[in-house]
């Protein structure tokens, strides 16, 4: 994939994510790209998180191991059960489970 002349690669990634829609996953550690694609309903995964997912696939760990993932980039929920992921995080995790087949 290439960007056009005078077009930033970030813009290409955001445009493609919007075109593909909410079933897509973008792997990036760039916060600006993450925010833009998440506003379009696309799941954004950091490079470190994606590496952990791939390692989990390689070692054959269960899907339940992923639910305990703690990413410092995300805010801690303010109220409710502190051990339960937010609704947005639960939806995101459901979409990410598709990566692990």
Image (cartoon, rainbow, N blue to C red):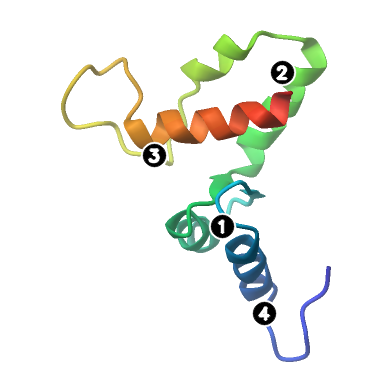
Q: Which labelled disc corresponds to residue 8?
A: 4
Q: Earlier in the sequence, mark 4 or mark 1?
A: 4
> Is label 3 in contact with label 2 (beta carbons under 8 Å)?
no
Q: Earlier in the sequence, mark 4 or mark 2?
A: 4
Q: Secondary structure at mark 2?
A: helix
Q: Which residue is mark 2?
A: 56
Image-based side of 9 in relation to 69, left or right: right
What residue sits 71% from the left and 18% below the top?
56
What residue sits 67% from the left and 79% below the top?
8
Q: Earlier in the sequence, mark 1 or mark 3?
A: 1
- Quadrant where the N terminus sits is bottom right
Q: Which residue is mark 1?
A: 30
Q: Earlier in the sequence, mark 3 or mark 2?
A: 2
Q: Secondary structure at mark 1?
A: loop
Structural distance between the alpha carbons of marks 3 and 2: 21 Å
Give residue 78's position: percent from left, percent from top.
18, 32
What residue sits 49% from the left and 57% below the top?
31
Structural distance between the alpha carbons of marks 3 and 4: 26 Å
Q: Which residue is mark 3?
A: 74
Structural distance between the alpha carbons of marks 1 and 2: 23 Å
Q: Nearer the viewer, residue 87 or 71?
A: 87
Q: Earlier in the sequence, mark 1 or mark 2?
A: 1
């Amino acid at each position: 994939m290439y960007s056009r002349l005078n077009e930033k690669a970030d813009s290409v990634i955001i445009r493609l994510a919007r075109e593909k829609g909410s079933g897509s996953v973008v792997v990036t550690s760039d916060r600006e790209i993450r925010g833009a694609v998440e506003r379009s309903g696309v799941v954004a995964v950091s490079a470190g998180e994606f590496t952990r997912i791939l390692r989990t696939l390689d070692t054959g760990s269960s899907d339940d191991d992923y639910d305990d993932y703690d990413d410092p980039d995300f805010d801690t929920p303010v109220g409710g059960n502190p051990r339960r992921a937010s609704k947005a995080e639960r939806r995101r995790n459901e979409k990410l489970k598709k990566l692990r087949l």
